[in-house]
Amino acid sequence: MLQNKTFLLLLLSALFFLNCKEDKGIPGKLPPTQNPPTQKVSSTIAYAEGFSISTVSDFKVLKINNPWPNAEKTYRYVLISKEEAAKRSFMKGEYDGIIITPVKRIVVTSTTHIPALELLNEEETLIGFPGTDYVSSEKTRQRIDNGNVRELGKNEGLNTEVLLSLNPDVVIGFGVDGSSKSLNTINKARIPVIYNGDWVEKSPLAKAEWIKFFGALYNKTAQADSIFKTIETDYKAAQKLAQTVSKRPTVISGAMHKDVWYLPNGTSTEAQFLKDANVDYLYADTKGTGSLALSFETVFEKAKSADLWLSPSYYPTMDALKQANTHYTQFDAFKNNAIYTFSNTTGKTGGVLYYESGLARPDLVLKDIIKICHPELLPEYTPYFFKPLK
Amino acid sequence: MKNKYSYSFLILTILLLVLFCVNISLGSISIPFKTIVSSFFTATDSLSNQEYIIQNYRLPKAITAVLVGSGLGISGLLMQTLFRNPLAGPFVLGITSGASLGVALVILGSSIFGGFLATFLLTKWSLVIAASLGSFLVLLLVLIVSSKVRDTMAILIIGLMFGSITSAIVSVLSYFSSAEQLQQYIFWGFGSLGDLDWSELQIFAFLYSLGIGFSILSIKGLNTLLLGENYAKSLGLNIKQSRLLIIIATSLLAGTITAFAGPIAFIGLAIPHVTRQVFNTSNHKILLPAVFLFGAIIMLICDSIAQLPNTDYLLPINAITSLIGAPVVVWLLVRQRKMVF
């Protein structure tokens, strides 16, 4: 067994030396492989479970635990400065990627990554994005219109050639199951791909905390921490404010596709927003992954007299809702014009703002919901994402 | 002759009525029998929740199930006789694919064609019109081809090819579509019986009746066609006219049903076989009403199962028809060791 290991080490070292040229001639000071020097967690992560950042002597290790639901592998990346990188080298296969920080050229693949770049004032580093039309945030939109951000096709089938020609320092991908062929190809071409798992997180604040992940890429840990701290404080304050009311309106959500009503389950982040806004979400006691798929009958019986109706799928108007299914008109929320949607708040090119920024700014989402459900609490506030359906 | 089948018809009719009532009384929520009865006598504006569900959801759904089952069964029967092939059916001949293509163009194509189509998209009628046009055009193509190609097997293969072309176009369209559009298209593909309100059901029933009318008119032609085209000609039957009649009837039935309820698998192909196994005749005067009854009965059963009575969930009707139906056909064929055709 031991012999096997030694042999493997020798083989790997041999491979490493053979590959030295391609590794830009980093001098061969072998890194410690066993019992690396004392690790200390440099950035405390309070909510997010999907990633962690630890400092190992003169570089950082970024761990991604849960890039997609039930992921089996933990991904480890080295974040290292150019100077330090010149001094050391890493064993092949020890890490899933080595990223020189601060990152100068980045490709992200989800609009949810854009606000983090903007909050950190790093939107200038974005050089490519799949589906640029979905991006609404002004600063990045401007850069796209000026031709500074290359269109990369679609996320499921990235234009690999264009991406390779851009030669970014890192690609922030996301995967439903890690089987993205184009991302694998890019990784093979020695462009590190990090899977971002913000969407897997279970609470709104945990999702927002992924700004610290981007902070680490840009060596802006302190700034990211303070941005998140502000968001967290605002969120908590709003949540506390909402608890002061005694009357909790009843709320339903979602809409029907054919005759099945899809709505968020009680453990989803959407339901957590509703809980934190102190409203009576009618399906708060349900559990599960994915959304609930209920028959029209059950929803009708339970929710016909609900006070409010949030996010009725993608229907843009009351009329569209009625056209799609006359049963909707029977609901009290429909009769009382108490339906609110975020799908009409779009950017210049049609991207839905909520999908882009809602994840990074849970404080705003919560305040929106509080304003709708308890208008007296936030008299001055204007909802940012949610607007009444007309 | 009449006596031989009248008992079977009587039993099937009673079964249909019973199942219709069972279907209405089963659903996600349990509704007391009293409420079910009272809901038929309550004025529309003063309905309770449960009465509303019976009157405006379960009743139209049960009627849709009857129309869909019987209509698809009959269109399958007509095609099997016309093409003299036991494998013929709305799915195989590409009628359903044609409808899918129409729907895909509306739902998925809106991002490519933009503007007008996008606003047109959210009304249900756009899907109905698109699906009907699609299935009619494909059937027309099959018809044109069938006038050039004598071999009915070749026509079946051509129908299958249309299906392949359709799914290829749908793939290309899907590639350029957003998640919401894809979702909408996929949900359409699941099939659905409970999505029609009374006004839609009226139009559906009207088109369906037209289809049934044409089917009845073509009974004589169908019976003669079974003897072979040449023999039919020698009997003085106008083959071209009969063919046209049958094809119009089929496309009306299969097209409208697919348009309103989505592509419902298996029923069109299997119901005629089940009927033939039970009735053991090739006379369409008997077969047509028998297929009507069997189709309606089986669809009602499938729908009752799909509702998963007393749970909050629904299963896609399309999956149930295949899951329940296909093994039945296999069992029948194995038991009889031959295909009555």
Image (cartoon, grey):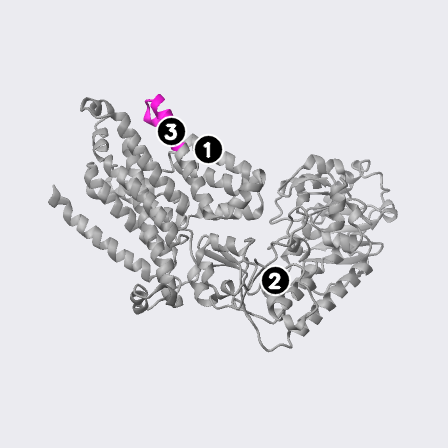
Question: A349 and A39: which one is in front?
Answer: A349
Q: Residues within 10 Å of mark 2 (few under 14, many from 20)?
A: many
What's under tag 3, amino acid-wise? Val
The residues colored magenta run B138-154
What's under tag 2, amino acid-wise? Thr
Please tell me in which quadrant of the rendered image residue B330 appears.
Answer: top left
Q: Check if mark 2 and mark 3 are on a common chain.
A: no
What's under tag 1, amino acid-wise? Ser
Q: How many marks do you count on the picture?
A: 3
Helix, strand or loop status at disc 1 = helix
> Mark 2 = which residue?
A269
Residue A34 in sight from this viewpoint: no
Q: Is residue A358 left or right of residue B36?
A: right
Residue B237 percent coordinates (x, y): 21, 26
Determine the chain carrying the residue at label 1: B
Q: Is residue A176 left or right of residue B145?
A: right
Please tell me in which quadrant of the rendered image residue A211 appears.
Answer: bottom right
Between the residue at mark 1 and the residue at mark 3, the CA separation in whole angstroms equals 14 Å
Question: A334 and B144: which one is in front?
Answer: A334
**Disc nearest the viewer among 1 and 3:** 3
Q: Which mark is residue A186?
A: none
The quarter in which the C terminus of chain B is drawn is: top left
Kindly indicate whether the residue at mark 2 contacts the one at mark 1 (C-beta within 8 angstroms). Answer: no
**Disc nearest the viewer among 2 and 3:** 3
> Mark 1 = which residue?
B164
Helix, strand or loop status at disc 2 = helix
> Mark 3 = which residue?
B142
* SS assignment for the magenta stretch, majority: helix
Q: Earlier in the sequence, mark 1 or mark 3?
A: 3
Question: Is B148 in the magenta?
Answer: yes
Helix, strand or loop status at disc 3 = helix
